Amino acid sequence: MITVKGILSRLTYQNPDNHYTVCKIQVPEIHDQITVVGHLAGVTQGESLTITGKWISHPKYGDQFEAASYQVTLPATISGIRKYLGSGMIRGISKGLANRIVDNFKENTLEIIENEPDKLETIHGIGKAKRELIENAWNKHHSVRRVMQFLQDNQVGIFHAGTILKTYGSNALNVLRTDPYLLAKDITGFGFQTADTIARTAGSKKEDENRLQACLICQLLMEEQEGHVYARKPDLLAACSMMGGVDTHLFEAPLRELAKLKELVIEVPGEKTDTGETHDCTKIYLARLFRAESSIADKIKALLTLPVANYKISENQILEEVLTSLAIKLSREQLDVVTRVLQQKIAVITGGPGTGKTTLIRALCTVLRKLNLTVVLSAPTGRAARRLSEVTGKKAFTLHKLLGFNHETGSFDKNFTNPLDLDVFVVDEASMVDTHLMHHLVEAMPATACLILVGDTFQLPSVGPGNVLSDIITSDQVRVFSLTKIFRQAKQSPIVTHAHNIRDGQMPDFKEATPEKLSEFYFIEKQSPRKVVETILELCSKRIPAAFPHLKDIQVLSPMHKGEAGTINLNQQLQRVLNDTQNGIESRGSVFKSGDKVMHLKNNYEKEVFNGDIGVVHEVNKAEGLVLVDYDGRIVSYDLLELEELTLAYTISVHKSQGSEYGAVIIALTTAHFPLLQRNLLYTAMTRGKHLVIIVGTFRAFEIAFQNNKTARRLSGLRKKLME
């Protein structure tokens, strides 16, 4: 490791969440400034830094010094202190006031501000309010540095500093010193091992109750990230034993204590095995997940006990109204569903591609409008809501917007005391709704309303915990209408045919399309990931535009982010061949250029852009550090610090594609994707394409995915709670 000392002369970029920084340092021994990159929290222009790290060579920006650790060196001389305080970096201290403070306390000035701020009131012009302002400003300026220094001293990754400060504020350092295990409980993804490193360095014992409690909570948070609502007790204790390095029986007392503190819920079902022998089926829930799951079951059961209005409309009237308004003649199956759905308090409509789910929603809206009922359409994501609006011609909302999600408090405005104002609530793409969201959805349902859930249970489950739609269907407590008839036009589509074959467990018969007759579906076999990438580049840049000039919307999908045929590499390669614009702005290893296809990565309620929204870079303004993105005609601006919310979207993951349809879909499929190859992923990817689907990869990978119908079974208690 090399150590350099210098003055921070320019702060080029700093990520506010993880404090990744690019800056210029003026080193006395070197004439030119050096570029330093790394996690440097709480640093300000003009400060003296001692940085330890190594030299690296960036292919575009040349030599850079990569910081592993650093210290802010506060000035020791009276002139240095006078200059430091007079720079304006500490709010409340003007240049004149800085001179008076230094004249009084000399070389002890900074120590007085840090440890004995009350003495500042002896200075003319500083009363209690002014002293508190200076004290708070000093602490705010130096709190990040203190936390970073503490993490470095304990050999802990400093990229956690931003999250720690955001969670605990000015109390962050106190938490780190007195109860670091709180971090494992409060910050998802922080990790038990990181908190344990800090605590064990401070002398915590392996059997410490706080340590074992944190281990339990951390493991349950990891289970939640995997989609589980609860953990089986034996599995939980075994995992915690491995994580904590202590025997399983030592977790019994901490488990009971956490239940007493209402942080966990222990549910003892008393079930029997198929052989009739009893075994430990105890379920351990995070309390909030237990409350959410129980609330869903209780509200659904309560709604099902309420009477349904007797709507006076005959089958002939339904047929006539739909034919007149939509120019659509309903099939016998569709008519039966529309007629019977109107008699349900809660209903589920499910079916594969080409079975008419969208037509059914349009017909229902028409009939309900005829009955003067208020119908509200919604979907879990912005993309799914927009698609629903396009096909129905009726405004559709995201569930978060409809339920009034407050991003500052994390709460929802709509609930049982302030319910939604509607008669019929239609939720499309319901398979994407997780336990948390469904809990808030049913809480906001007025007792007089009906709920209709529409979805395809064979698609991938929700990203969040639970298997809500599937549990509701298999509980047999709610009326389910399964659309099975594939309409004639859809029957002629090999996309629909192959998708239904996969759904039904029948291996599709892929036949190469002849040059004389273009097909909607192709399987192009390429053995190596390199060949897969090369083929996809050629398809996107030449072959599809030449053969299908009407298909402007081409989306590449990949099961994974990593690897040669993963989203990261494919995005970079596709950008290279599809966008030759020279100027761009770099962020987190990606360069955003005018014309790039991009995706927004997390809900931003201020910008009204949501996780998974796809747009096109409209303009890049390097002088002002701005990237302007066009989302369906609406221009949204991103500054340098906000670019972490964007990623290139020439290729996206199959999970991110849920709820969307594209003119043409290309699916990268290799055995390197083995960890995620399963039948419902294949089905979900294929059903995203409207007019053209091309799989590029090995038939062996396709076989592995097709044969793997053991979808990772999510641990969820909703089905049982609904049946009780």
Image: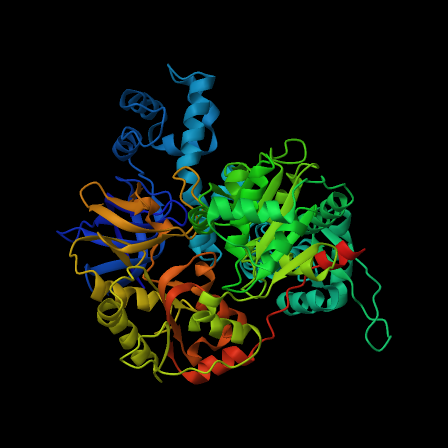
- Residue 159's x, y, as percent? 42, 54
- Residue 117's x, y, as percent? 46, 27
In the image, is 526 to the left or to the right of 386?
left
- Residue 365's x, y, as percent? 54, 44
Q: How many marks?
A: 0
In the displayed structure, would residue 144 be above or below residue 485? above
Name the one closer to the observer, 468 or 622: 468
In the displayed structure, would residue 28 be above or below residue 233? above
Name the one closer to the observer, 117 or 462: 462
Location of residue 550 (image quadrant):
bottom left
- Residue 504's x, y, as percent? 58, 75
Quadrant location of the N terminus in the rendered image:
bottom left
Location of residue 523 (image quadrant):
bottom left
**Can residue 643 be seen from the camera position used here?**
yes
In the displayed structure, would residue 619 be above or below residue 553? above
In the image, is 316 to the left or to the right of 251?
left
Q: Residue at x 34, y 83 (%)?
A: 526
Name the one closer to the observer, 17 or 365: 365
Q: Residue at x 44, y 59 (%)?
A: 656
Q: Residue at x 45, y 81 (%)?
A: 701
**Can residue 200 be seen from the camera position used here?**
no
Quadrant location of the C terminus in the rendered image:
bottom right
Q: Residue at x 56, y 59 (%)?
A: 331
Name the one closer to the observer, 146 or 584: 584
